[in-house]
Image (spheres, rainbow, N blue to C red):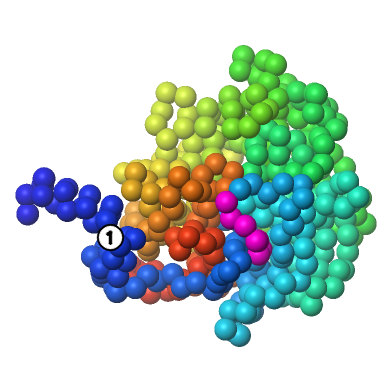
Amino acid sequence: MPWSLRRSFASWREKALPTRCPALYQWLCFGRGASALKPVTHGPHHHFFGYYEKCPWNTSESLLLAHEAEFNDRPPTAKDSVRVGVVHVREGNRFETLAETQAWNWQQGAMLQWHPADPERCFVHNDRRDGRFIAVVRRIDGTEDRVYERPIYAMHPGGRLALGLNYSRLQRCRPGYGYAGVEDPWSGEPCPDDDGIYQMDLDSGASRLIISTAQLAQIHPLGSMNNAYHWINHIQISPEGNRFAFFHLWGEGKGETERGGRCYTADIDGSNLNCMMDAPVVSHYDWMDENRILMWAEPAGEKGNFFLCDIRDGSRQVVGEGKLMWDGHCSFGRDRQWILNDTYPDKNELQTLMLYHLEDGRRVDIDRLYAPKSKWWGEIRCDLHPRWSRSHNMVCIDSVQSGERQIYVADLRDYMRRETD
């Protein structure tokens, strides 16, 4: 077939078939008559989990954490609640409401996550009470087990401590990641010295500031930092809990107007700060091990790529050149070779869900899902945010392909086995 004809056919296939003839599209693109992704939640309400770096399954993989919302077409306000609960995946995917919260967003929900100390029967979520954001620990029967006076972002794998940040500042500086309803005490200060990342002891509930925004603003300051607001986002603790990574960002402080960003790592107590990536664009990342991080970045003068960065010597190497060509939500499988990833909607408004093998450089597309930016973009967009199951045999995503925001699951074993054999 001539190249021009192949190109015309591919363009027609991507534009016309996904919504009009999905079965034919699946057959042409993936060699099957139906999507590998199966819904585990259904309308009339909307359901989602949230971010990609947290596992929604409990240890036995019988329960899947989820949020349930009444609407899907606007950002949540201070008056809006969302229900949190579990999907009983072995009981016909029955959703059970266990609580409500007023501290949430579409990207990361209420930071819903299983408690590392008891990931079978105990979970954590943020909430807003008495004019402040807090964190709540619950049992799977909905019983409130513990309340912390600060909200949580990331939990140590040993379950002994958690890291958090200022969600009010995040809401002002990066809407869609913070929470509405509480005024930032430092709203008039570009880089306060008594706000930043705090560490909380989960036994005593005591917390302390370990890295301040003022401290970060004073490290090799750039001209773009002048009169800029500084904030922190995307904290992730390393697999063994020795270190953590985070983004230091600065800009106008009025929305998506970042002037620049840096990705830092630090020891779990906040010491040994190390700037791993200083670039106009720093984006999604995942720890490969205690020393290496995979990250999408667009360094000055370079095109965007996924880089595998080594914090020991500052070296970095491009990963997936020519195959992982766009920013996506990346995460390593258990063998640290298979990587789950996705894309934002392309010109045909399709999001691609894929696997990539680090050693062999093979990319395996699992599905492409319709997500019209005319309806869902900005604060209310629905990224796939692919998440591994605890067995690393399944993937869970959020999607608006049906017109509702719902959760889908696919078995990955056949894909990984087929590509390995």
Image side of residue 112 versus residue 293, left or right? right
On screen, residue 182 above or below 416: above
Find residue 172 and report its image quarter: top right
Number of numbered discs on residues: 1
Residue 296 appears in the picture as rendered = yes
Image side of residue 75 versus residue 148, left or right? left
Image side of residue 122 versus residue 32, left or right? right
Q: Badge 1 is on which residue?
A: 17
- Picture quarter with the C terminus: bottom left
* 196, 240: nearer the viewer: 196
Find residue 191 and report its image quarter: top right
On screen, residue 265 above or below 51: above
* 351, 340: nearer the viewer: 351
On screen, residue 357 above or below 307: below
Question: What is the span of residues highlighted in magenta in the rendered image?
Answer: 67-73
Query: x, y (%) of residue 418?
Result: 33, 72
Q: Which residue is pictured at 80% across the width and 73% down the height? A: 142
Q: Which residue is pictured at 58% across the width and 79% down the height? A: 93
Residue 122 appears in the picture as rendered = no
Q: Which residue is pictured at 73% across the width and 53% down the height? A: 80
Amino acid type at circle 1 is Leu
Neighbours of disc 1 within 10 Å: few (<14), some (14-19), many (20+)? some
Query: x, y (%) of residue 250?
Result: 65, 27
- Picture quarter with the N terminus: bottom left
Image side of residue 61 versus residue 36, left or right? right
Query: x, y (%) of residue 279?
Result: 53, 28
Mark 1: secondary structure: helix
